[in-house]
Each structure stands twice: as C-alpha cells, then as structure tokens.
Amino acid sequence: MGSPSTPRASLHVLIVDDNEDATETLSILLEMRNCTTARAHSGEEAIAAFLSDEPDLVLLDLGLPDIDGYAVASRMRSESERPMLVALTGSADDETAAAVRRTGFAYHLVKPVDLVALDGILKRAASARTTASAPDTIA
C-alpha cells in the first residue's frame, strides 16, 4: 500500500461501484488523501449524485447492476465536460481499453486500484480543477 499523497486542493470525488465494501475502502483511502467523497451503488444513483454533488472526479465501475458504466459516463458527459471520469474495471484487455477511450474516460484503472496511479490521477484532477484545463486522455 502506497503512502497517502495530498492533492494541492481538496477534491470532491464520486465513487460508483455496486460492491459496497470496495466503495467504502476506496472512500477511506481518498479521505486519507484529503478528498471528500460521495458514493453511489447503481447507475441511477450515480447520475443523481453527479447532478446534485458536482464532483471534481468520478471513479466509475463499468459493471453496474442497472445501467452499465459506459452509459452512465455518456450521460455524465452529455451534461458536462467536467469532471474527470475514471473507469474502474476488472479487465485490462484491449477491447475494454478501447471502449473506455471511446466513451470519454480520462483514465482506466484495473481493480484492485493501484494507489500510485490513483495518487497521480488525484494530482492531475486537482491541477485540472485549478487551471480549468482539460485532462489528458489515455493512449
């Protein structure tokens, strides 16, 4: 487990995963990194939270029970170019990576989440928020 790295500015992160234990664990890790968090366990909850909470970053599981994460991300993107969207998946295959890019995710993290990669994303999200620049997309 990596050491917590505090972003320059506190971020508000929406965590979306149907696995409540995983959501809770990720929330604790983010709060240790000076972030505030909101949680959703379905696509419908995620969209409602997104519209009401205005997060800086969304960590979005693709395998949700009601609406898949791709459709949730597309809906979020239709509402706003902000926030940064990060796909959470159990798969690193080429097909999933290509679908993630096409959908407009900035990053793709494979579960269990690599904490060094997460820290880098938090820094980029904080920087993007303060400079109002668009995030880099994954290659």
Image (spheres, rainbow, N blue to C red):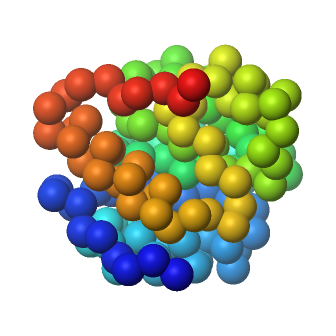
Q: Nearer the viewer, residue 137 or 41?
A: 137
Tell me where residue 77 appears, x and y as whole percent: 51, 23
Identify the residue at image location x=16%, y=56%.
Answer: 9
Left or right for 79, reference 132: right
In this rendering, is residue 48 above or below 37?
above
Measuring from the top left, give residue 41's x and y in whole percent: 68, 60
Q: Residue at x 16, y 58 (%)?
A: 8
> Is 91 placed above or below 30 here?
above
**x and y, in percent, of residue 46 in the image:** 59, 48
Residue 103 drawn at (x, y percent): 65, 22
Whether residue 85 is visible: yes
Name the residue nearer the viewer: 113 or 85: 113
Which quarter of the figure has residue 48? Answer: top right
Taking the image as shown, residue 79 lies to the left or right of residue 112, namely: left
Image quarter in which the C terminus is found: top right
Q: From this view, report whether residue 125 is shown above or below residue 26.
A: above
Left/right of residue 96 with respect to residue 124 in the rendered view: right
User: Image quarter for residue 15?
Assistant: bottom right
Residue 75 visible at all: no
Residue visible at 46% across and 63% down? 116
| Along the line of sight, the residue nearer the viewer: 56 or 96 | 96
